[in-house]
Image (tube, rainbow, N blue to C red):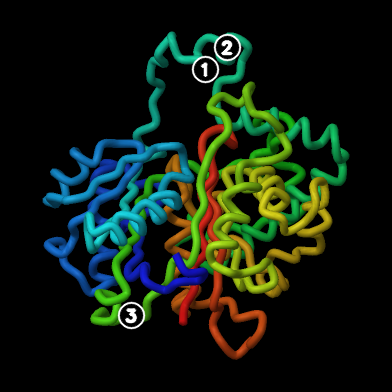
Amino acid sequence: MTTGQRDIAIVGVAESDLMGNVPNKSSLQHHAEAGHNALADAGLSKSDVDGLLTAGGSTLVTAEYMGIQPTFTDSTTVGGSSFVIHVAHAMAAVRAGYCEVALITHGQAGRSARARFPADGNLPFSQYEAPYGIIGAPINYSLACARYMHQYGEERTRQGMAEIAVATRKWANLNPVAQMHDTTMSFDEYYDSRWVSYPFHLFDCCLVTDSGAAIIVTTAERAKSLPKKPVWVLGAGEGHDHNIVSQMPDYTSTWARKSGPLAMQQAGVTHDDLDLTMIYDSFTYTVMVTLESLGFCAPGESADFVANQRTAPGGDFSLNTNGGGLSYTHPGMYGSFLLVEAVRQLRGEAGDRQVKSKKDPSQDPKISLVNGTGGSLSSTGTVILATD
């Protein structure tokens, strides 16, 4: 592949009709609504789709429900990063001729359908972590964050986490469909929020919502005939280095240290070229460790990097401009929503939260990095997106 090649494009993105607390809709309905809306956004119909990708459920079920009979299918599931990884898989499938129009869908009644389910007692998690109280994402991620605090300082780390939580809420206040659109957050309110799992306060943790999102990937030739300007996929990287958190090689570094440089190398871009950065924010700590793993700053320096509301509206580092998983939506897996916002920003469709190009503030952003994280800081997928 030629560096920065513009042969594969994202041509449609959308969310499901309603998000937040939607007790009367199933996960499949969120899938279908998001898919329908993304097709409308792209100017395509269901009959155009010949590739289907999703995570957390079978493409057999999703395709049947939506009335699609794909010639290419992928249900790679490695947590919330899966949908970012699906972009690379769709890109490869389109180039190989397995399909021409690939639909990536996600739908999850994460809030309304919450229920305990019996874990397989033979799984490593059940045998080696659950007996010791390591039983869910807040605990897993707080374990990693506690190690980071030990290495780099508790007070300094806490301030960085607070900066991220407050800045992300400010972006949500500009997004009319964000769960926390009408609720502001001060630093005092962040510090006063209840404990969840030390060192996490409530506002260090993502939301739990009902929602869906979809992305459509196709060829440059097909994109030329569609109504909206294409967003090109210039580079991609993916991978993972553990499953259960007790086997994480380094609690202060994620696989983004591999996927990020690979995606940027493929795209032929550097950090200075990026106008927008979308980072999975399951927890405030996820953002801090990802910024460092991606090379925006050195290990232990993310608190300084985000200081003084640098990532908030009006700051010089545009980050998670939709309000993120912390304040916009998070149905259980979030990576698809990172892509939706990146595409809207690059197309100049973000309304009150629209950011501009660093090199030419009169123009919409030109290049965005999107990084998803999945599992217990286990997997990452990174893509570089750009307009002409």
Residue depicted at 59% across the width and 37% down the height: 377
- Looking at the picture, how far across and down is residue 235, in whole percent? 50, 62
Q: Depth check: 362 or 99 in front?
A: 99
Crowd rating for badge 2 (residues with CA inside 10 Å; few <14, some 14–19, many 20+): few
Secondary structure of residue under mark 3: loop
Real-space CA distance between mark 3 and mark 1, rounded to the nearest whole angstrom: 45 Å
Of all residues, the one furthest to the front in this rendering is 2
Residue depicted at 45% across the width and 52% down the height: 84
Q: Amino acid at mark 3?
A: Lys
Q: Amino acid at mark 1?
A: Phe
Q: Taking 246 as reference, is 153 above or below it?
A: below
Q: Which residue is disc 3 drawn over?
A: 228
Whether residue 258 can be seen here? yes
Q: Which residue is disc 2 drawn over?
A: 128
Check whether the beta carbons of the residues at disc 1 and disc 2 lie within 8 A of each other. Answer: yes
Q: Quadrant of the N terminus?
A: bottom left
- Kindly identify which numbered label has been placed on residue 340: none
Real-space CA distance between mark 1 and mark 2, rounded to the nearest whole angstrom: 6 Å
Q: Earlier in the sequence, mark 3 or mark 1?
A: 1
Of all residues, the one furthest to the bottom in this rendering is 362
Q: Which residue is disc 1 drawn over?
A: 125
- Looking at the picture, how far across and down is residue 319, in whole percent? 63, 63
Secondary structure of residue under mark 2: helix
Q: Depth check: 71 or 317 in front?
A: 71
- Looking at the picture, how far across and down is residue 42, in whole percent? 27, 72
Q: Earlier in the sequence, mark 3 or mark 2?
A: 2
Crowd rating for badge 1 (residues with CA inside 10 Å; few <14, some 14–19, many 20+): some
Whether residue 24 can be seen here? no
- Looking at the picture, how far across and down is residue 123, in whole percent? 45, 14
**Residue 28, located in which quarter of the rendered image?**
top left
Real-space CA distance between mark 3 and mark 2, rounded to the nearest whole angstrom: 50 Å
